[in-house]
Amino acid sequence: MAAATLARRIGRSGVLPLCCRLPAWDRAARPPPGPAQPPGLPLAPCRSFSNNKIQVELDESSGVAMMKFKSPPVNSLSLEFLTEFSISLEKLENNKACRGVIITSALPKIFSSGLDITEMCGKSIEHYTEFWRAVQEMWLRLYGSNMVTVAAVNGSSPAGGCLVALSCDYRIMAENPKFSIGLNEAQLGIVAPFWFKDTFVNVVGHRIAERSLQLGSLHPAPEALKLGLVDELVPEEKLMEKAAAVMAQWLALPDHARQLTKTMMRKAVLDRLVAHREEDIKNFISFVSKESIQKSLRMYMEMLKKRKS
Ligand SMILES: CCCCCCCCCCC/C=C/C(=O)SCCNC(=O)CCNC(=O)[C@H](O)C(C)(C)COP(=O)(O)OP(=O)(O)OC[C@H]1O[C@@H](n2cnc3c(N)ncnc32)[C@H](O)[C@@H]1OP(=O)(O)O
């Protein structure tokens, strides 16, 4: 689907209507590009594209796309960012030449600061609905992607930023102990929804997830490795090289076998949100509309600003 058409269908709702396409985790495995492809079949025109928030470059010879978050100061996941993120994933997913994507940040020291807190403060019910649907959509696309997804975590990655990394197939983090990662929602006085929790449990197991979620822990990179929250640490200057090597290793397998295995591992968790999407939106709205929650979020934002001065 052309980007303009997709953007029109998303409209202001930030939602990619599920009726527009089969979810990635239900699609048949794609044949690998190259010799198996009928000669003369044009590849989707998607070599490189970028928007205000995200830059994507696809190397058609390897089938690997590089997606860089570039939304200063901290790559917070605003409604606009999430919409652009979903559009970018959709474009790659629909491009037969693309088999894998490496996700990283173009900003120094920050992968993503998580959901944009200002989107959850003092807004209308309509806005909360639109925002939360966009968060769901992003996760459904990323966690359910048929592509190989590798997170090259080159900076701190709290909460929603951690969810992005957790939703990938493999996480490599820069070995800087000043960079931390985790679902720290409890520290903000808020609660990670069930599908954040499920994604976390699927990566680190129940006990580690429970302790980390209750404490709202942000784990420095070396600790994140010990917990299995990331798969590898490498010196920052080697991060992209390593990500490319890991990607090549994963792409060496036949797509159909890997994709069906991924679907088998993730389907139950994806289906759970799909079955309860509207209820999840209602829960989000009633939760963030509470005066006590609004107060906690405002205090947290003030704390961030004070820490700076
Ligand atoms: C019954 C159950 C029902 C459940 C229903 C659901 C309930 C709700 C679920 C919501 C889930 C939420 C997920 C989230 O992702 S919340 C966001 C969590 N993020 C954080 O805690 C990170 C906060 N930020 C930081 O720690 C630091 O900014 C960071 C380490 C990322 C960078 O530090 P640095 O020193 O480099 O930069 P600054 O702190 O000076 O920040 C620069 C400016 O950016 C603003 N900022 C930072 N993070 C955010 C953010 N996440 N959203 C919006 N704005 C952010 C910061 O305030 C600075 O702004 P100013 O320059 O204007 O001061």
Image (cartoon, grey):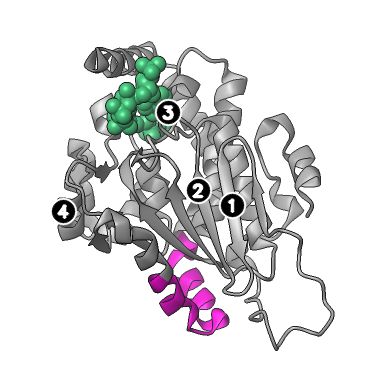
Q: Which mark is drawn over residue 73? A: 3
| Residue 255 image point, x, y percent | 55, 79
Q: In the rendered view, does 126 fall on the left or right side of 142?
A: right
- Marks 1 and 2 close (CB-CB < 8 Å): yes
Picture quarter containing residue 238?
bottom left
Nearer the observer, 160 or 269: 160
Q: Secondary structure at mark 4?
A: helix
The reply to whether the residue tagged 3 has its Cβ within 8 angstroms of ligand 1 is yes
Pointer 2: what residue?
68
In terms of sequence position, does the residue under pointer 4 or pointer 1 come before the other? 1
Mark 2 and mark 3: span between their CA atoms?
Answer: 14 Å
**Is the residue 62 above or below the residue 252 in the image?**
above
Q: Position of residue 37 (x, y in %)?
A: 74, 83
Question: In the rendered structure, which segment of residues is drawn in magenta?
Answer: 245-268
The reply to whether discs 4 and 3 touch (Cβ–Cβ < 8 Å) is: no
Crowding near the residue tagged with mark 1, few <14, some 14–19, many ≥20 C-alpha atoms within 10 Å: many
Dot 4 surroundings within 10 Å: few (below 14), some, or many (20 or more)? some
Residue ranking furthest to the front:
237
Per the rendering, the mark at residue 222 is: 4
Q: Residue at x 59, y 52 (%)?
A: 56
**SS of the residue under disc 2:** strand
Mark nearer the N terminus (2 vs 3): 2
Determine which residue is flagged by label 1: 56
Looking at the rendered image, the disc whose residue lies closer to the viewer, 4 or 3, is 3
Q: CA distance from mark 3 to mark 1?
A: 19 Å
Amino acid type shown at disc 3: Pro
In the displayed structure, would residue 117 be above or below residue 147? above
> Amino acid under label 1?
Val
